[in-house]
Amino acid sequence: MGYKLRCMSRLRRLLVQLPILVVGGLGLGCKQERVPGGTINPPPQAISGEPSPAVDTGNILKWDSAGGRGLVLAANASGDGAMVLLPSYAPGEFHGWHSADIHPLANTRWDLFGRTGGFGTVQLVPEQGGGDPDGCTSWPPATVHGAAPGWRTAFEAGVATPVRLDSIEAMSSADSSRLTIEITRLASSTHGPDDSLFSTIPFVVRNAYRFQTADIEGVVALVQRSIHSEANPREEHLFLVMERPVGSTNSYKLGYITRAAGSEWETPLTDVLAMVTLTATHRLVLIASREFADEGEIWWIERLGPDRWRSTWRSAAAGCS
């Protein structure tokens, strides 16, 4: 048993054409073919222009020890399958796994989280073995006992508390429209690499979630604009976090943004898994996945201060490149 990204990516590419659609997590199924001559796993392109606290420059720092000994990810819809990510499974540092890597986590307790909050506490049982028989890169598999469907990621028990993310689909039509306008306004105010083909195309909000803490209220959103050319269909995705003080009627300020652009099948899809507050530091952390044609990786995006979010760790890619 191993983790691989599969042809669900192709289905999600079709589904993402529908506006305000919440796409799924890292897909499972039959392997997708590589786009001829394409680059499967390019690094994310940061927004260029004047320096801003919101811009993610791609300078990945290190795992925050306040996050415990690692992350656990849901591996199937039923909720009983899992994958283990250790801090050492970072780009350039992951060369396959062995049972000894995750043996210290056997029978430990983990709190489950999803976009809507907490999903209880379970026991983790890592599977034996190592590597992947068909040559794909995988993260260590495990099972969790008593997990309800819907959870997306897990931290060691007591390490974090949930922050609920509410889809703007649940808002009234008027409120949803106002927030959509605010999101696209911020997206349009950024400046990426010059591309005259995209410059006249408006952004569309593909998914967006609201959240609130004792101090701030914010939005996490993925916006997109597309060039529907039969010869060379292209997409530009912006993933952003914006915030303002609780109760404020002022405009949101941009706290984080990344850009990815390329051919329709090569541009990675970003999916929000959960948001939590770390118990030890009280910092907000957003856990997101980035899915390429046949690989995927996990991003840890941390709030460092007012209007300042950074991706401080990301996993090595798993899949069949």
Image (cartoon, rainbow, N blue to C red):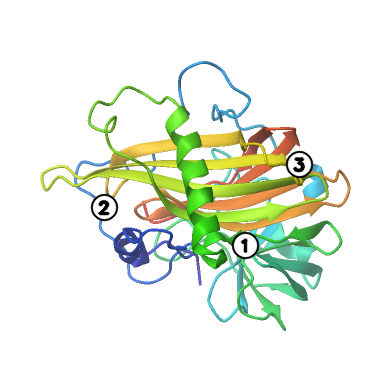
Dot 1 amino acid type: Asp
* Mark 1 surroundings: few (<14), some (14-19) or many (≥20) residues within 10 A: some
* SS at circle 2: loop
Nearest-to-viewer mark from 3 and 1? 1
User: Residue 28 vs residue 161: left or right?
Assistant: left
Task: Name the outermost residue toward the top.
Answer: 50
Mark 1 or mark 2, earlier in chain = 2
Give how far apart the Cα atoms at labels 3 and 2 are: 34 Å
Q: Quadrant of residue 105?
A: bottom right
Report the amino acid beneath label 2.
Arg
In the rendered view, tell whether residue 293 sits above or below residue 112: above
Residue 200 seen anywhere in this rendered image of the structure: yes
Residue 115: x and y, percent? 63, 63
The image quarter containing residue 63 is top right
Picture mark count: 3
Q: Earlier in the sequence, mark 3 or mark 2?
A: 2
Task: Using the image, tell me which numbered label, if any, was put on residue 166.
Answer: 1
- The Cα atoms of the two marked residues, 1 and 2, are separated by 35 Å
Q: Horizontal and vertical percent for residue 196? A: 24, 26
